Image (cartoon, grey):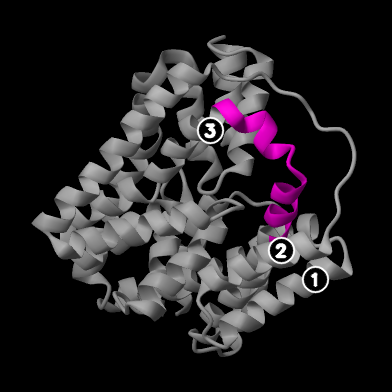
């Protein structure tokens, strides 16, 4: 999706130059949250300021949200129907395959030394011992400072004008906290949902799948808003919809608080990323050249590999395995690792699942 946005804004529409787009990709990979959503918002900001950012965010997420809202409503009313139940058996297995692939891919690119592997294993063990994911992330960041050393030249990127970016950041921060304040006094459940989704986004370095590990802990284990099976089904529906995988937050929100919950989940799982873009633009060059920052981020990314591996195993344990499910899982793993588009894998898997399970 990032490549597609870059092609659209640089080559096709010529709204951005190559340097500005690359600057945005580096920034959005550095910040926590959904990289594609952050980059779409960044592109909108560069093209048309704060209005462009909000319009780009809405345009990028709205189709996926509307489809997820429809799927959530259908799921709530029909998930116990035998045909629908059979369909989700296969989708849940496919989700486990996708999570295993994500853990492998992130680990292949991030775990390049014994120290990396050590941090990942300690993080997975911490979750197994019921440690808070936030504490595991803080511990991994500290281990990164202690264990790693960085050297070499730092790429210089174009700085953003301080005054404009600070003004926009101030506006978004005020809007964000005023909205939380209003939710707190109007509906405590919606406030809790918004606060949880925001917390997930703020610490989710590494993209959507890492945020899913935190979401699983918060909504399944810590608060018991939904069970593991329903959360797996939500991830599966997130794969069927176009757009970011974190639209699963609207599925969770719908099961917690109906349509209002779906809207709140979708907004607050992405909102902190928009605020952080405008907040960090003036300091991006200095911020990312910090040796301490690089050590912390490397430790956190290794932590997410361990956490993603742990969640993959946890969700796999929720499935009632037999020979048919094992063969189905092997086939989906092969297709995922061969690069089959996840949308087609999910759709084909759903059809096969109805007849097999």
Label 2: which secondary element: helix
* Nearest the eye: 154 or 308: 154
Assess disc 1: are there few (<14), some (14-19) or many (≥20) residues with their C-alpha within 10 Å of its C-alpha.
some
In which quadrant of the rendered image does the C terminus lie?
bottom left
Assess disc 3: are there few (<14), some (14-19) or many (≥20) residues with their C-alpha within 10 Å of its C-alpha.
many
Q: Is residue 210 above or below residue 353?
A: above
Q: Main secondary structure of the magenta part?
A: helix
Task: Give the labeled residue for mark 3.
Answer: 39
- Asked if labels 1 and 2 touch by Cβ distance under 8 angstroms, the answer is yes
| Magenta segment includes 289 | yes
Q: Which mark is residue 302?
A: 2
Q: Is residue 38 above or below residue 264?
A: above
Assess disc 2: are there few (<14), some (14-19) or many (≥20) residues with their C-alpha within 10 Å of its C-alpha.
many
Give the percent coordinates (x, y) of residue 302: 71, 63
Q: Which mark is residue 117?
A: 1
Could you tell which of marks 2 and 3 lies nearer the N-terminus?
3
Could you tell which of marks 1 and 3 lies nearer the N-terminus?
3
* Label 2 vs label 3, nearer the camera: 2
Give the percent coordinates (x, y) of residue 347: 47, 56
Quadrant of the rendered image containing residue 135: bottom right
Point 61% across, 34% down: residue: 27
| Magenta segment includes 264 | no
Which range of residues does the magenta coloring cover?
A: 282-299
Using the numbered discs, state the Cα–Cα distance from disc 2 to disc 1 in whole angstroms.
7 Å
Give the percent coordinates (x, y) of residue 324: 57, 84
Direction top: furthest residue: 14
Using the numbered discs, state the Cα–Cα distance from disc 2 to disc 3 in whole angstroms.
23 Å
């Amino acid at each position: 999706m990032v490549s597609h946005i870059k092609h659209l804004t640089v080559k096709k529409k010529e709204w951005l130059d190559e340097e500005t787009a690359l600057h945005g990709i580096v920034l959005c990979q550095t910040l926590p949250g959904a990289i594609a959503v952050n980059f779409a918002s960044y592109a909108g900001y560069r093209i048309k300021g704060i209005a462009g950012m909000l319009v780009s965010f809405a345009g990028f997420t709205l189709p996926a949200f509307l489809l997820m809202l429809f799927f959530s409503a259908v799921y709530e009313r029909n998930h116990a129907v035998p045909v629908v139940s059979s369909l989700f058996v296969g989708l849940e297995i496919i989700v486990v395959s996708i999570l295993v692939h994500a853990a492998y891919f992130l680990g292949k690119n991030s775990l390049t030394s014994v120290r990396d592997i050590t941090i990942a294993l300690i993080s997975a063990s911490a979750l197994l011992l019921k440690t808070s994911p936030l504490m595991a992330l803080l511990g991994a960041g500290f281990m990164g400072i202690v264990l790693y050393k960085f050297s070499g030249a730092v790429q210089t990127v174009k700085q953003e004008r301080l005054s404009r970016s600070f003004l926009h950041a101030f506006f978004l921060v005020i809007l964000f906290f005023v909205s939380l304040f209003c939710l707190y006094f109007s509906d405590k459940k919606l406030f809790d949902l918004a606060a949880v989704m925001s917390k997930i986004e703020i610490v989710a370095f590494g993209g959507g799948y890492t945020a899913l590990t935190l979401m699983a802990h918060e909504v399944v284990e810590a608060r018991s808003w939904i069970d593991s099976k329903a959360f797996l089904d939500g991830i599966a529906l997130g794969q069927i919809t176009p757009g970011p995988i974190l639209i699963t937050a609207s599925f969770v929100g719908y099961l917690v608080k109906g349509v209002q919950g779906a809207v709140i989940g979708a907004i607050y799982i992405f909102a902190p990323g928009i605020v952080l873009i405008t907040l960090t633009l003036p300091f991006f060059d200095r911020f990312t050249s910090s040796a301490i920052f690089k050590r912390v981020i490397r430790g956190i990314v290794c932590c997410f590999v361990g956490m993603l591996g742990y969640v993959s195993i946890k969700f796999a344990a929720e499935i009632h395995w037999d020979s048919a499910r094992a063969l189905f899982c092997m086939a989906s793993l092969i297709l995922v690792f061969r690069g089959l588009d996840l949308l087609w894998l999910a759709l084909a898997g759903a059809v096969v699942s109805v007849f097999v399970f």
